[in-house]
Structure formats: structure tokens, C-alpha cells
Amino acid sequence: MEFTFYTANKIVFKRGAIKELAANIGGLGKKFLVLIDPAFVNTPVQATVVEQIASIGAACEIFSEVRGEPTVELVDEVAGLAAKQGCDAVISVGGGSNIDVGKAVAALLTNGGSALDYLEVVGKGKKVEKDPVPFIAVPTTAGTGSEVTKNSVIGSLTAGFKRSMRSDKMVATISIVDPELTLGCPKKVTANSGIDAMTHLIEAYITFRATPISDGLALKGIELAGKYLQRAVEDGSDIEAREGMSAAALIGGMAFANSGLGAAHGVGMAMGIKYHLPHGEACGIALPYVVELNADVAGEKLDKVGEALTGKRFDRPGEGTKACIDFLFKLNEAIGIPKDYKFLNVPREEIPSLAQGSLGTSMTSNPKKMDVEALTEFLSKIV
């Protein structure tokens, strides 16, 4: 047995942790670039962050224009601003997109160049050689797990791609998870980000690259997401559910960053790029079908997933897998995730190209090996 495990250098998980920011960032920088989600502009959260930075004798530059998924152009713009303002540390307060931008900017500040230079497949093959400036991730949604992953997903609307800037050096210096920051998250965002977390957890558990550490994390995260996701969507003020989903998302990020993902993310990425679906929704639609797809090669583990989701014990092989699939379909319906992709009215002739587009990094870790022909057949049933 041989494996490595990477995660944030320090993780703080606590209700109200944002109010103790100063205790964790002292000595990390003299001027912080603060990427704050537009929803938190001119709110007590922004005021708290600014006050906490000032209390350690540091200054800050606020940027609040991260809207939608990150693009090369946006990352380069923010990196240029940070360099011009002399920022030597970065704090992201927001969802996965906000955190991905901050993570990439922290690396560009020391390594130079454009984000495009470092992107997998479409870039120039440059590597992040120098340690990024200190990066602090403060998630305000429960889904992406970006606060503990080592990559930033960056796209281009004009070129039509979405790829990762990836390096072990890009893992956050500190991840501060305050479940209270997710209380105002809209219902649809809660659903999309939450089903993304569920997908991370299940795929991280069944991938052939899974390790004993990622397995333990993922199985506990699946239990948490099964218990709390629907509750968090139905009642956004349910702090117990918000806390449970914040933990599930964090655990999911730790797990899949070290074990990889699978076909739900491969297909979800292709569908999201082509039809501009929210990432979590695109992956969540595929998830129960991907579980079914992998049942013959990952059945033993999927039986355990079914037990974690339902809290029941299944004695016969396959019963837990069936329970898992049924649970996911019912969960998706309850939180507003479409049953399949048929609402998009995709022309049948486009399915092979979607299958080709699904063969990204995520697909390489899927338990069952898939090629374009197999993916075309798979997609034809749900598109």
C-alpha cells in the first residue's frame, strides 16, 4: 500500500470563526487582497474581516467582482490588481469560484505569467515552481470543497473550455470554515452546491484511486450529506443542517483532492460547458446514473454508501446499491435537481461530441473504464 495525502496546512471549523480571523492570520502578510462575494459587500461580515486585518497592523485591498465561474481574464485581472497594490497575501470569502480565483492569484503573484500558461491540456505546460503567497480560504457555501483542494478550475467563455490550474503548492495556508456564513445562502445555490458535495463524496469513495484516509473521510461525509442536505435546502436557517453540510463539503474536498473523482464529474463538466448549467446541478443529474453504471465494479463499496445514506443495514449484495440509487433520485427531486438532461433538448447528433468532452481529468479515476463509444451509449439514455 502506498499513497500521499495533501490538505490545507491548518483547518479551523467553528461557528463564528470569522470573528477570530486575526488569531489565525497574524504574520502572514502586511497587505491582504480580500476577495469577497458580492453578497457580503458592505455587510457586517466585510466589516469584521477588515477590522480583523487592521487589528494585526495590516492593510487590505477589497475586490468584490467575482461573479459566476472563474475565467482566465478575470484571474489575470485580479492578479494584476494585487501585484499593483503590493499585496503579499490573499483571503477569499465566498463560494468555490471566489476561492478558486484567490488560490490562482496567490500562485500567480509569485510565479508570474497568465493563468492560461498553467492550465492543464489547454495551457503552455508551465508549473507552479514557487510557493504562492499565503492564501486563506473562507467558504460561504457548502459544496465545492475548494478550501482544501490543490487546484483552481478556470474557464473561458470565448474558447469554450474549463480546465484546472493544479499544484500541491496551491493548497490553502489556512482554511477557515464558519457554518454561520452559509445561513444566507439562497435555496438553489444550497441545493446545487450541496449535491456537488455529495457527488464529490461518493465518487471519491468508489474511485480506484481511493486510499484508507480518503475512504474514511468520504464515508463519514456521505452520512452527513445524506442526513443534512435536504434539511439545509428546505430551511436555510437550520444551523445544525448548515453545520453538517459545511463539514460534508470540507470532508469531500479533502477526500477527492487525494483520490480523484469519476464519470459524474466528467459528464457534468461537459454538459455544464456546453449548456451553461450550474456545475453542481450538472453533476448531480448524472450522479444516480453513474452509481448504476459503476455498480458491477464497485458494488461492495456502493452497498456501504447505501447504508451510510439511509442508516440501514443491508445483508444481500446489491441491496445497498439499489437503496443508494433510490435515495439519490428522491433527494434530487426534493431539492429541485432535474431527473435527467432531457429538458435541454439536446440534438442526438451532438451526443458523441459530449461524450468526447466528458473524457477529462475526472473520468480517468472512474471505477469503470469508459471510452467515447461507452459514454455515447450512456449519455443516450439520459440526454
Image (cartoon, rainbow, N blue to C red):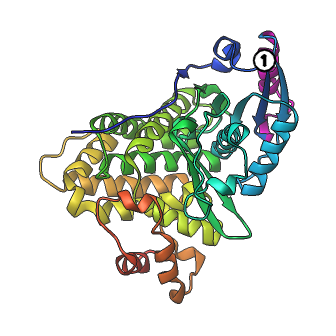
Q: Is residue 264 left or right of residue 55?
A: left
Residue segment shown in magenta: 38-55
Q: In this view, does 84 lie to the left or right of 102?
A: right
Instruction: Tell me the residue at 41%/37% (across/down).
Output: 227
Quick one: 2 or 186, which is closer to the camera?
2
- Residue 176 location, quadrant: top right
Q: Where is residue 213 in the image (x, y as percent from the top left)?
A: 32, 34
Q: Is residue 46 magenta?
A: yes
In terms of secondary structure, what is the magenta stretch mainly? Answer: helix
Residue named by callout 1: 53
The local secondary structure at tag 1 comes to: helix
Q: Where is residue 56 in the image (x, y as percent from the top left)?
A: 77, 10
**Disc 1 marks which amino acid?**
Ile
Instruction: Tell me the residue at 82%/44% (across/down).
Output: 80
Q: Where is residue 263 in the image (x, y as percent from the top left)?
A: 40, 62
Crowdedness near tag 1: few (<14), some (14–19) or many (≥20) residues, C-alpha within 10 Å: many
| Residue found at the far bottom of this picture | 349
| Residue found at the far left of this picture | 316
Q: In this view, does 44 lie to the left or right of 120?
A: right
Asked if residue 352 is positioned above or below residue 233 in the image, the reply reads below
Looking at the image, can residue 63 be seen? Answer: no
